Structure formats: C-alpha cells, structure tokens
Amino acid sequence: MSDNYNENDDSNSQEKKIITEEENKSGDYEDVCFVCRRPESKAGKMFKLPNNICVCNDCMHKTMETVSQFDYQGLLHDPRIQNELDQMTRQGGIPNISFVNLADLQGDGGIPNKQKIKKKKKEGSQPVLNIRDIPAPHKIKASLDEYVVGQEQAKKVISVAVYNHYKRVATNTMDEIEIEKSNMLMIGPTGSGKTYLVKTLARLLDVPLAIADATSLTEAGYIGDDIESVVSKLLAAADNDVEKAESGIIFIDEIDKIAKKKNTNTRDVSGESVQQGMLKLLEGAEVEVPVGANSKNAMVPLATVNTRNILFICGGAFPDLEEIIKERLTKTASIGFNSELKDKYDKDKNLLSKVTVEDIRKFGMIPEFIGRLPIIYTLEGLTKEMMVQILKEPKNAILKQYQKLLELDEVKLEFTEGALDAIAEKAMKRETGARALRSIIEEFMLDIMYEIPKDDNIGRVTITREYIEGTGGPVIDIRCNQMLDDMDKLKAVSVEE
C-alpha cells in the first residue's frame, strides 16, 4: 500500500513539474532563491534543485560550508557510507525513501506566480508606451463623456494632465529638457464621481491602476499598511511586471484623512507622518516593495520600483473645507464700502471651486505635500438634473442595468419622466451623491424583481412617480396587450412613412 502511495506522489510531482515548466517556458519570470528570497537579477545564477526549488550561489555555499564543519561521528569517512552515497548519486535519488513534496506545501512550482518577479526588458526592446498610440486630450474627454455625466472642467483637466504625463513617459526627455510629473489633487463632495472618473480613465487607457485608501496608511513601524504598500498594489495590478508598473496610475482615495491632527500631544502616526513619508513617492524614487504581499518579511521577495514615471492622483472630500474658504472670502471689513455679508456664500453650491493652496494648507496638508501635487481641481456637487442624466444617459447607467436584467426574463422595463424626477429628488435629500440613486432603486425594485418570475404573462412594467412616492403602484401590461400596443406603433410608423 505504501509503494502505491509513493508512486502516486511521484506521478503528481511529475505533473506539477510539467505544468511549471510550461508556465516558465516564456522566460518572463525570474527565479527567486528559496532561502534568502532574492530574485535572479540580484542574487545571480541559481542552482536548480528537485521540486522546482532554486537556491542562489551564496546560500548554497553557506549551506555547504555549514555541513562540512560536521563529521557526524566519522560517518562521512566510513567507506561503506561513501559507497552508499556514490550509489545514490548515480541513481539520482535515495532508494526506498520518500521525502515530503515541498511543491505541495509551496503551491505549484515551489513559489506561487503571484510572488514571481517579471524580468525587465533589455535595452533596445520596444517601449511599453508609444507616443503615437496615446489618444489626444479631446479623444480622452469624449470617451469619458460616455460614462461620466457633467464635471466638464474636471474631465478636461484630467485629460490634458494624463496626455502630457504619458508623452513624458514615452519620450523620457525632450531636447534634454526634463519634464516634471503632473500629479493631481482632486477635491469634490462625496458621491460626485472621483473614484469612478479614475477607474474609467484607467480602463480606457489600458494601463495598470492601483486604488489605495489613505485611511489605512501609517508611519513605518506601526500597525497598519506601510506607505510603500500602494506601490505594491500597483505591481500586483501589473502582473508583477516592474516595467509595466513603472508607467501606471496610483489613485489614493480619502487623502484628506491624513491631514495634520489639531490640538493633540500624541505622535501623529497616521497624519503628518504619512504625508512626510509620501514625499519621495510623489516626486520619484526607487523603493523596494514586497511581491505578492502587503508587508515586508523574510519569506517574501522584494522588487525595486522607480516611481519617477508613475502618475499619482489623490482625491478626497475634504469636509469642512468650505468653511475655511468661506472664512477667507468674508475676511474683509464688516463695515464700509468693502464690507460683505456673512451669509453671502452660504448658498453657493460651487464654493469648492474657489479653493486655494492656502485653504488646503490650513485644512492640515503640509506645504511640501501640496507642492508635489501641482494640478488641483474640484468636482461640482450633483444637481437634480445631473442625477436624472446619471440614471439614464451613461453607457452603463443604472436603469439600463435593470432593463437588461428584466430582458433576461423577456419583460420590458420602462420609467416615466415623473418617476426619474422623484428618484432624483429623493437622492438629493440623502446628500450622499450618486450613491443614493442605487440604494433608492434597490428599494422599490425589490418587490418587482421578486414577483415578475412568478407570472409568465407579464410583458411590460412601467415605473410611475406615484409608485416611487408610495401613493400608487407600477403599471403592469400582459403580453397580449403589449403585442397589440407594439402593432399599433408599427402601423403609426408605416402611415407616417
């Protein structure tokens, strides 16, 4: 029985070895030392051991030196032992003994692919980006218009900034004049589309994107994510391809949460310290980041990533920033010709557009941090008209998603203009931006999505304003009535023609 078990183990290990060889045939990934976890580019040539284990030259020599110091009570000098060792070496293994398959413990191929580092391309190979392939700013904005409603100024700013950034990456230098990075700071109320805008942009450009949350970042040595973890996420998004990651985009959300804490005597490990630690990343530096993990430890290989060509976009809602802007604008004399009413800006919905660097500094961001984000722009608060547009106009609008769901049940879903206005009015009262639209639709669509699969005769459902406000119900048409209505519409069209 034990012999059969060993044979099965051997066949499994052979299968895994074949799979791993096929994966590594392309030679895109580097081998990583099993002992010191350094990649081949740093440690040098590797020794290939059974079960796809690789050991670097240094670790192999240290191991051999350690073993050679012990004689094991003279066993190594015993001629019988020497004969056995010679026989085992000729046969390529130890007879009648089966070892634990380390590949089973480490995953397929010893080290998982998520912890393998992709080799850097040699000089002379084709660059990742070609300046001719970068779409012009007006084309980038036109693509964003299909998904994002409103925010014309923000879309124009981000289109020009991204176009200039990738021109800089593709050309490296232009007539020996080094072009600086155009990192961005995006300010806008919650639910105005900050994260959605960046996600859409990265999908259109087909570049690796990492979205990190600044609330989890802490100073090195404290519980939480290190500052370099945002670069590690980008490396994972680029399939551990360092060269591809070095031309990606990092979006750091909730950047206002790392503002300096006021009136505190304790160490500010998640505020000003994080801003200080991010300065080198924003400007451009070589940092060592763990591959396939968020924190550095002895069992995780490290990769060196240069952040000089990585575009950083920081976004935040900056609550109470409007009060700082209002205080600055009404600072003039309260009596005389230059006096202004204290409530002059209370009803100004676009007060954030008047923000200055001084306001952001007063909020709690240090001057060195603001200086590395040269492009500052704001997003408008959503109006009722914009809410209605978000419901029906984008390519993946919420209403289109539900219409697609009901089409799978062969049922048409329609909304009256009054219903759309009622949904937008409810969303405005919640003051959570576009996120409120989804939650409102989920509430009144629950009963419809539950009842429709019960009856195969239902052909069309029309959502009315009365149903949204709770004073009536949806209009439900049976399939035969729907067919008659469709035929009447076709007759009307043919008569007009």
Image: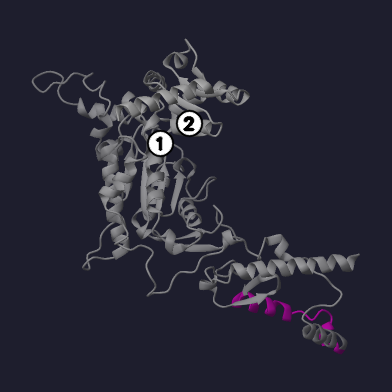
For residue 196, above or below residue 136 = above
In percent of width and height, residue 47 lies at 63, 77
In percent of width and height, residue 208 lies at 43, 54
Name the side, left or right, on which 224 lies relative to 136: right
In percent of width and height, residue 2 lies at 89, 66
Viewer-side label of 1, 2:
2
Point out the image quarter for the N terminus.
bottom right
Q: Earlier in the sequence, mark 1 or mark 2?
A: 1
Answer whether labels 1 and 2 touch (C-beta < 8 Å).
no
Kind of residue at disc 1: Lys
Name the side, left or right, on which 71 lies relative to 347: right
Can the viewer see residue 36? no
Q: Most prominent secondary structure in the magenta stretch?
A: helix
Residue at the limit of the structure toward the right, as seen here: 1
Q: Residue at x 40, y 36 (%)?
A: 261
The front one of 83 and 93 is 93
Q: What residue span does the magenta drawing correspond to?
A: 56-79
Asked which secondary structure carries label 1, the reply is loop
The front one of 360 and 44 is 44
> Splitting the image into 4 quarters, where does residue 315 fall?
top left
For residue 388, above or below residue 468 = below
Q: Report the Cα–Cα distance between label 1 and label 2.
A: 47 Å
Name the side, left or right, on which 298 lies relative to 205: right
Q: Residue at x 22, y 65 (%)?
A: 177
Q: Residues within 10 Å of mark 2 (few under 14, many from 20)?
A: some
Q: Is residue 144 magenta?
A: no
Kind of residue at disc 2: Gln
Which labelled disc corresponds to residue 403? 2
Tag 1 residue: 261
Q: Residue at x 48, y 45 (%)?
A: 218
Asked which secondary structure carries label 2, the reply is helix
